[in-house]
Image (tube, grey):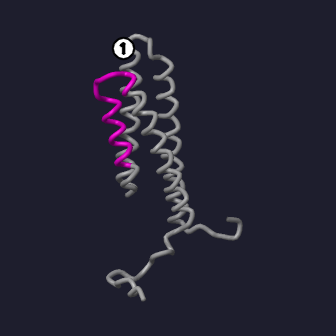
């Protein structure tokens, strides 16, 4: 990528996705802390789950305003999972898998932002060329 210049829109999108990655890695650490504190008092577990849900809800809102719908969907479902009741083992397993999925989605979004949008740019209202 040494010879390729980024447009200001690409640089802004990359910065947004990197901020999302930072939050997702923080949430991954909190899920690991929740996993290691299975035998802790219920108040500590509830506080950790509340923090995870709050961070994921903020991530969802920021992803919606940045128009990255897939990340917002994953973060929203994880926030609901963290906030609801139920078995702790099921919650930890679901959050671990979901955060890994979120990190994969963010990695894909970062690659797409670095590539740019030049693949399919047409003037608005113009239809794609017919396939031969």
Classify 91 as above or below 24.
above
Q: Position of residue 34 (x, y in %)?
A: 46, 23
Which residue is identified by label 1?
43
Q: Position of residue 43 (x, y in %)?
A: 36, 14
* Image point (53%, 38%), residue name: 25
Does 84 lie within the magenta span? yes
* Image point (47%, 51%), residue name: 105
* Image point (51%, 62%), residue name: 112
Q: Quadrant of the N terminus?
A: bottom right
Total of numbered circles in the picture?
Answer: 1
Classify 56 as above or below 18.
above
Assign a secondary structure to mark 1. helix
Classify 129 as above or below 106.
below
- Residue extending furthest left? 85
Classify 43 as above or below 98.
above
* Image point (42%, 27%), residue name: 92
Q: Position of residue 21 (x, y in %)?
A: 52, 45
Label 1 Cα neighbours within 10 Å, binned few <14 / some 14-19 / many ≥20: few
User: Looking at the image, which is closer to me, 58 or 81?
Assistant: 81
Q: Main secondary structure of the magenta part?
A: helix
Q: Quadrant of the C terminus?
A: bottom left
Q: Position of residue 129 (x, y in %)?
A: 40, 86
Q: Is residue 4 left or right of residue 96?
A: right
User: Looking at the image, which is closer to me, 3 or 35?
Assistant: 35
User: Looking at the image, which is closer to me, 39 or 72?
Assistant: 39
Does 112 lie within the magenta span? no
- Quadrant of the image occupied by residue 94: top left
Q: Which residues are magenta?
A: 72-90
- Residue extending furthest right? 2
């Amino acid at each position: 990528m040494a010879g390729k210049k980024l447009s200001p829109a690409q640089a802004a999108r990359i910065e947004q996705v990197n901020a999302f990655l930072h939050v997702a890695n923080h949430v991954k650490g909190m899920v690991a802390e929740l996993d290691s504190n299975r035998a802790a008092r219920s108040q500590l577990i509830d506080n950790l789950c509340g923090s995870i849900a709050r961070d994921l809800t903020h991530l969802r809102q920021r992803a919606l305003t940045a128009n990255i719908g897939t990340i917002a969907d994953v973060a929203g479902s994880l926030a609901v999972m963290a906030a609801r009741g139920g078995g702790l083992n099921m919650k930890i397993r679901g959050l671990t898998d979901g955060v890994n999925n979120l990190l994969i989605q963010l990695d894909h979004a970062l690659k797409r932002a670095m590539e740019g949008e030049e693949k399919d740019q047409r003037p608005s209202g113009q239809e794609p060329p017919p396939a031969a």
